[in-house]
Image (tube, rainbow, N blue to C red):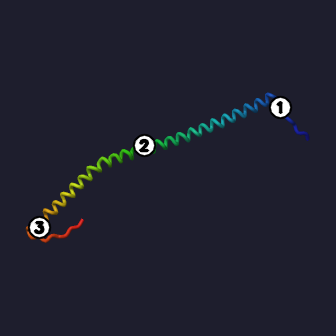
Amino acid sequence: MKKETKKVTLESIAKTIEKLASSTARGFEDGEKESKKRFEALNNRFQEVFSELSSIRADVRDVKGTLGPLTRAVSIQNEEIIDLHLRVAIIERKVGIERKKVSF
């Protein structure tokens, strides 16, 4: 049995090169499409993270804004409580009521 050999012609080489070129082009196109999909998904995730960070930043700003006044209010209330304890102690002494020990 003799092996048949194909004749290599300039036309067959050109067709082979064209097939190889179009196959390579399709590969790059597919790779580009996949890269775009991944980039879009990653970009969407980043947008979600940035949105959450923005929300957290606003929450922290709100907490900082209310913390100062709350701290001052608690401090004033503590001073008033101490003052009221002293006044009640004076009244109890004058009336003769035995004072119960209160600890904080």
Q: Amino acid at mark 1?
A: Val
Q: How crowded is the residue under tag 3: few (<14 C-alpha within 10 Å), some, or many (20+)?
A: few
Q: Residues within 10 Å of mark 1 (few under 14, many from 20)?
A: few
Indicate the amino acid at tag 3.
Glu
Q: Sequence-wise, which precedes: disc 3 or disc 2?
A: 2
- Decide if residue 26 is on the left or right side of residue 59: right
Which of the marked residues, 3 or 1, is nearer the chain's N terminus? 1
Q: Residue at x 15, y 63 (%)?
A: 86
State the residue in front, 58 or 16.
Answer: 58
**Badges 3 and 2: C-beta atoms under 8 Å apart?**
no
Q: Which amino acid type is shown beneath numbered disc 2?
A: Ser
Q: Position of residue 95 (x, y in %)?
A: 8, 68
Q: Label 2 belongs to which residue?
A: 51
Residue 38 image-quadrant placement = top right
Whichever of labels 1 and 2 marks the residue nearer the N terminus, that label is 1
In this rendering, position of residue 1 left or right of residue 18: right
Depth check: 25 or 95 in front?
95
SS for dot 1: loop
Q: Are marks 3 and 1 in contact (CB under 8 Å)?
A: no
Which of pointers 3 and 2 indicates the residue nearer the eye? 3
Please state, as top left, top right, bottom left or bottom right, where the N terminus lies in the image. top right
Any mark on residue 8, and which? 1
70 lies left or right of 19: left
| Residue in view at x 11 percent, y 67 percent | 92
Disc 3 secondary structure class: helix
Q: How many marks?
A: 3
Read off the residue under disc 3.
Answer: 92
Residue furthest to the top in view is: 11
Picture coordinates of residue 25, whole percent (x, y): 66, 34
The alpha-carbon separation of the residues under discs 3 and 1 comes to 120 Å
* x 73%, y 31%: residue: 18
Q: Quadrant of the C terminus?
A: bottom left
